[in-house]
Image (cartoon, rainbow, N blue to C red):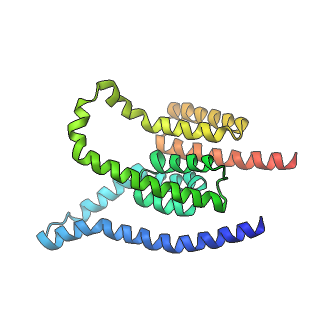
Amino acid sequence: MKREMTELGLFNATLIRLGTVTLFAGIVANFLPALYIYLRYGVIPPVGDLVKIWLLVGAAFGVAWIVQPVSFFPLIGTSGSYIAWLAGSVADLRTPASTMAQRSVNVETGTLEGDLVSTIAISSSVFVSVTIVTIFTFLGSTLLPLLPAPVKASFGYILPAVFAAVYADLSIKDVTFGLVVLATSIATTLLGNKLGIGSAWMYLISVTSGMLLGVVFFKLRGRS
């Protein structure tokens, strides 16, 4: 066990160095189109407008910038986190791909084997999703209007269905803990709606309470 933790630590240290470089390169690449437009045509928004937009985005998604990495890291691992946040669609594509792959080969999350399997699964999902997105970029505008209205309406339930599938798969490992976390999340949602708490904060409270409950369950069972 000690040797495995040492190997995992060295593995993660290497990934962090590589991941930092790739994410920084991705950040720079995001600004290249805007930089080209400025250098080529001299068009740039006023600094005040840029600050306002950033503040609006931060207010809307700022909590998720903290909550989502903490929530998904135990499932997708270090390398999976770097790839997933660079590619996007962490909740609806990368995390399910990781959890299903780990389950298929019967490895535990948080281990060296689990991280390796997660990396392979997430990398494969990126290639698949890029291929599908490329196809639908050219054909989607023609195909989507032909779909029945109920099918198009069902697209709005994809993300909740994915979350439910991942939750059910993980809860099988500990049904009691899964039910307690579900009950806590439902109570948080009902109480939050009555108190007028924003959905982002309820998301944060639900994730934090789930983590704390996990620590409590672990300690209580360790003593028994």
Q: Whole-percent x and y of residue 201?
A: 51, 45
Q: Quadrant of residue 87?
A: bottom left
The residue that appears at 87% across and 49% down in the rendered structure is 223
Q: Whole-percent x and y of residue 134?
A: 29, 51
Classify the position of the C terminus by image quarter: top right
| In the image, residue 114 above or below residue 145 | below
Q: Whole-percent x and y of residue 44?
A: 18, 66
Could you say which is closer to the camera, residue 190 or residue 87? 87
Q: Whole-percent x and y of residue 172?
A: 67, 37
Could you say which is closer to the camera, residue 126 or residue 72? 126
| In the image, residue 44 above or below residue 52 | below
Classify the position of the N terminus by image quarter: bottom right
Relative to 53, 12 lies left or right: right
Relative to 143, 186 lies left or right: right
Q: Quick check: can you spot residue 59?
A: no
Q: Quadrant of residue 157?
A: top left
Relative to 142, 24 lies left or right: right
The residue that appears at 76% across and 45% down in the rendered structure is 217
The residue that appears at 19% across and 70% down in the rendered structure is 36
Q: Quick check: can you spot residue 212?
A: yes
Q: Residue furthest right?
A: 224
Q: Residue furthest front?
A: 105
Could you say which is closer to the camera, residue 29 or residue 65? 29
The residue that appears at 63% across and 57% down in the rendered structure is 114
Q: Residue furthest left?
A: 41
